[in-house]
Image (cartoon, coloured by chain):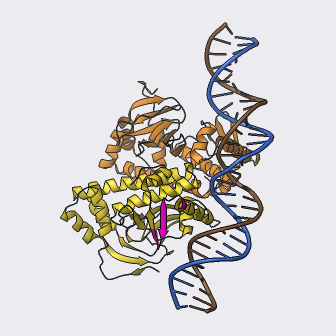
Chain colours: A orange, B yellow, C brown, D blue
Amino acid sequence: MAETCSIPLASFEPIATKLSAFGALRNADVDVLGRGLTDLRAHAARDPVLLDGPGAVRVVSSGWVGMARILSDGRRQILQIAIAGDLVRMPPFSDGHAVALTTARTVDGHAVLQSVRRGETAALQRAWRLAEQEAERDLLSQITRLGAMTAYERTANLIVELLRRHVRAGLSDGRRMPWPVTQEVVSDILGLSIVHVNRVLQQLRRAGLIELRASALFVRDGARLAAAGLTDPV
Amino acid sequence: MAETCSIPLASFEPIATKLSAFGALRNADVDVLGRGLTDLRAHAARDPVLLDGPGAVRVVSSGWVGMARILSDGRRQILQIAIAGDLVRMPPFSDGHAVALTTARTVDGHAVLQSVRRGETAALQRAWRLAEQEAERDLLSQITRLGAMTAYERTANLIVELLRRHVRAGLSDGRRMPWPVTQEVVSDILGLSIVHVNRVLQQLRRAGLIELRASALFVRDGARLAAAGLTDPV
DNA sequence: CGTTAGTTTGACCTGTATCAAAGCAGGTGG
DNA sequence: CCACCTGCTTTGATACAGGTCAAACTAACG
């Protein structure tokens, strides 16, 4: 279950790092983040990330959180992944929900979103907008992956996207990133069966593109990985 | 090629109808639409819908327009469809573009978007926001379709979505709607081959769910069609 | 009418799913 | 410290959804 943690960790750091990557922030901007992000909660893997009302927003401070839909017969499609620094909103479906894909922590983003909307801090607002645009781009990429790519391409493409995002959040040097999810989760992101995800990951390893060890993914050949994913290298 | 048409048709009608469906509009609101929508252009099928700059917005007044991505080897994925009353933006990709899927007409939505953003007309703003939320929902539905549904389910689901949207725009009574696209276009929306789209449409016909005649789609059994598409009836 | 774009059909192939069972690793309790 | 879970990964065998190729059919249009 989600439990509130009273120790104020630097939970605003990932989002500050990410937004900085989109445009330099001043101390005042970072202060808005530091003060506005409250109500840190810890979530166990598979637990729902509860959002108080349809307008609520939470910011991930660690772990991966997914926005998912469940079909009546149990099929699950993960629509979008949020890593540290990303926003989580309630999916606008009766059968949609936000779920912790790993153990994760989130904070309430309500106050910060308000600040940004009011436009008090121009630099923050600008970076925020760019980050939102990137999130939308990634959402559209998910459509291209599922609709037009083979399993191998999809997988490589997803890895490159997540690598870029981890670099942006200061959580990767571009050669190594956290890989905290089970293959079942990957299968629900990519619209593949668990078994096939396993086989595709093996292919990527045998081709010398990646390596998986200790919940970390090592990129062995970024250029060829990007090519396999029909995208640009990070 | 897109050619400018000087005759001022009632190109704001579809969007006015659609927005009314999300919340009653007053005369002042409709006036904003009537005055703000300028620069009517006609597009032939397959022509790009050119957007002046990344922030530009056009509103479809007739026909279907798609936001698409082209992969390097020619594969095309249509990300989102805009029918009359819907907004078209430039996809945020170098390989993305807006394209007329049928002969279509669009108008410049720049001025109206500004008005709405400024929040001069509360009712319009509210309806606009709801329409945007619906567009986002439909975008997420596209992900679910492609990632978690069979060809048969995808096709039925898409038909129901388009039916709902046409009803909202005042272009369908819920039993019959325009079906102006080739099966190739449908295949690029649904991530299927042309041949398979053809076979699935035949299945839907043989099952007595739909009928296709003269560029129109007739819904013969809305309840079963919705069930086949794992969604709610219109 | 001939031409062209689109639809339909048939035969065949392959990518991915499914089913089942065997490894493997981390955690728990005896 | 071992033995046992339990959840995850891996492997193999088989099935099927959907892709590909090729050609026939149809209808709109000059």
Give the residue at the far left of this rendering.
B27
Q: Is residue B107 above or below residue B18?
A: below
Q: Examine the rendering and report whether any part of residue A225 can be seen.
A: no
Q: Examine the rendering and report whether any part of residue B107 can be seen.
A: yes
Q: In front here: B14 or A111? A: B14
Q: Is residue B159 above or below residue B149?
A: below
Q: In the image, residue B72 lies at what x, y percent?
A: 63, 65
The residue drawn where x is 37% and y is 50% is: A125
Q: Is residue B205 above or below residue A157?
A: below
Q: In the image, residue B102 lies at what x, y percent?
A: 47, 73
Q: In front here: B4 or B190? A: B190
* B210 magenta-colored: yes
* A38 magenta-colored: no
The residue drawn where x is 60% and y is 63% is: B199
Could you tell whether A216 is left or right of A113 in the image?
right
Q: Is residue C22 above or below residue A57?
A: above
Residue A108's image quarter?
A: top left
Q: In the image, residue D19 lies at what x, y percent?
A: 66, 61
The residue drawn where x is 46% and y is 33% is: A48
Could you tell whether B183 is left or right of A59 in the image?
right
Q: Which residues are magenta?
A: B206-216
